[in-house]
Image (cartoon, rainbow, N blue to C red):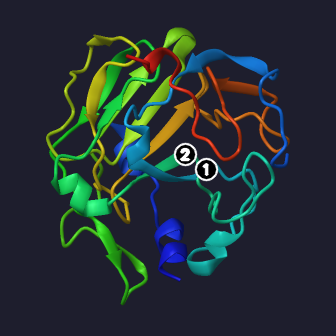
Amino acid sequence: MWTLLLALLACQPNPADTAAADSDSDVSEVARGPIQFGFPLPERDMVTARIGVDHDPTNNGGGFGGAACVDYEGRSFPNCYDQHDGSDYMLKGGFDTMDAGSIDIVAAADGVVIAVESEQYDRCHIDFAEFDVTCDGHPMSANYVILEHEGGIRSWYWHMKTGSPTVEVGQEVGCGEVIGKVGSSGNSSGPHLHFQIMDDEGNAVDPYAGPESQPETWWSDQGELTEFPGPGCTQP
């Protein structure tokens, strides 16, 4: 039951922040998107579940209605949750791992930093009595980095650990460059990275190709259903 609660409450960037196939699917021959992203978490063994983009346009409401969703392969919860616009990668060990130093987040492609927030509270968590996320009286605002890439495409890195962003607005960063660490700031039930791609018109794009998504993958190596994407250009 707690796994369900964690996933349903995992995250969504607040609007106020943004103002500043089956198991045999063959992804080796799919078309390629305009940018090929590498996986933004090099310490792959410290990442657990992926909770992906919801391709069901219906808003099914909060609570257990959040389990009504469709991911890029047509799967429902726990592979996605209602109205989720990015991909969440949960930190193995949760707050214990975060408190021990957490893990690096790296730029998934070459780009320019266009927004940074680093000073928000980063121990937001579930209040089981209220069945909701709480930031213990602090504003529910995330730490994050947003990069802009060729053609106006942007990548978002949300819920970072307080003080961990290592870049500044206007800075050029290379793929694989460390930009922060995984935390639990903002609308977050526990330490994880919310990775989101926005096209040049400001629409969220699922980087995964699939029957319920676009036919092009935006990953350099999407990998199989049971795998995380390949490191691509983030490979040391």
Look at the picture and state if 169 lies above or below 181: above
Q: Quadrant of the C terminus?
A: top left
Residue 16, above or below 18: below
Residue 36, disc: none
Indicate whether 229 appears above or below 102: above
Report the residue at 32% width, 20% height from top: 113
Q: What crowding class fits label 1: few (fewer than 14 Cα within 10 Å), some (14-19), or many (20 or more)?
A: many
Count of numbered labels shown in the rendering: 2
In the picture, residue 76 is in which quadrant?
A: bottom right
Residue in the picture at 37% in, 19% down: 176
Amino acid at the residue labelled 2: Ser
Marks 1/2 in contact by CB < 8 Å: the verdict is yes
List x then y, in percent, for residue 71.
Answer: 72, 52
- Measure how far apart labels 1 and 2 are at the Cα level: 4 Å
Q: Which residue is mark 1?
A: 52
**Horizontally, is 31 left or right of 50 in the view?**
right
Left or right of residue 63: residue 147: left
SS state under label 1 = loop
